[in-house]
Image: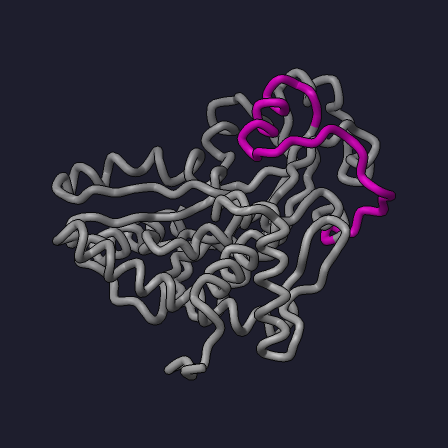
Amino acid sequence: MVRRYYDLPSLTALAVFEASARHLSFKLAASELNVTPGAVSRQIKAIEEEIGVPLFVRLGSGVMLTSAGEDVYAVLASGFSKASEVVRTVKSGDRSKNVTVACSDAFASMWLIPRMPGFWTRYPAIAVDHLISDNSRDYRRAEVDLRIRYGSGFWPDESTELLFNDVIYPVCGPEFAQVHRDATAESLPELPLLHVNWVDPEWPDWDEVLRRAGVPHGAPRGRRFGKFFVTLQAAQADQGVAVGWHRLVRQLVKEGKLVRITDLEIPAPGGYYLTWNDNRTLSPAAELFLTWLTEISADERAT
């Protein structure tokens, strides 16, 4: 048998592994690749046998990467992204006037999109595409030039620029606040709390907020929602108390649609960062967007 030049598993198997690692699910990888979950499982098993180490830990609810799997995925994701970028450039020609920006649904709807007219006015020839996802693994997709992320500021193979920090406080509807006007930080666990099922664990939930504030509590109860914006709509409808990020909710507070309840306020454990791939040269359009965003974020920090 002729030895493979790069001594790697087959490209088909590597593509199956990359999709499985990106989704942390053989089932979702199979759906993306239009094959059966069994076929995915066989390809992963073949790679693991060829290289001699496990790449995944099989769990009842899905799979998790081993440390070796994380290393292989990081290299493959970067390589596939570069290859995809070159192919897209060849197919579509000059993309110097296009930029794709990824961020969460909450940040897009409540901060970025309301400010985008300022960019369009200044740079009408630049086309901005938005990849809106609460799953940060989607930010590795090849078409993404810039990412706006909440967290610690440290991500592998990413250059980062701090946009601004934030503070967290409880918010609710005006009528709810009136009914519970005697509420204190210590009594918050007794109120109906509105929870967000964050996909990204960087975003703190009620349990972490109460713990950081030093408020004794058991397992926080209440209603759960899949989107932060929907959670805030429930809060505006006087259905309970939501965790509010000042940068995202202050306009709603200013308009009186939400009000702060109790004096609880804590610094957010993370910040909002603009990031981009260390191994990828930004297009002129991406450079312009980066400059514009850092300018308006400087104004944001001053308020």
Query: Can the viewer see residue 38 in this picture?
Result: yes
Name the residue rendered at 59%, 38% in the picture. Answer: 244
Numbered marks: total:
0
Decide if residue 148 is on the left or right side of residue 19: left
Frontmost residue, 183 versus 32 = 32
Decide if residue 36 is on the left or right side of residue 60: left
Frontmost residue, 63 versus 210 = 63
User: What's the colour scheme?
Assistant: one colour
Name the residue rendered at 40%, 67% in the picture. Answer: 78
Q: Is residue 252 above or below residue 11?
A: above
Taking the view exactly as shown, the residue that stands out farthest to the front is 1
Q: Is residue 246 above or below residue 57?
A: above
Residue 133 position within the rendered picture, expressed as x and y whole percent measured from the top left: 47, 42
Residue 68 position within the rendered picture, expressed as x and y whole percent measured from the top left: 60, 75
User: Which quadrant holds the N terminus?
Assistant: bottom left
Name the residue rendered at 69%, 35% in the picture. Answer: 195
Name the residue rendered at 53%, 30% in the picture. Answer: 229
Residue 84 position within the rendered picture, expressed as x and y whole percent measured from the top left: 31, 58
Q: Is residue 3 above or below residue 27?
A: below
Residue 146 position within the rendered picture, expressed as x and y whole percent measured from the top left: 34, 55
Query: Can the viewer see residue 267 in this picture?
Result: no
Magenta segment includes 238: yes
Decide if residue 210 is on the left or right side of residue 41: right
The magenta region covers: 212-240
Magenta segment includes 102: no
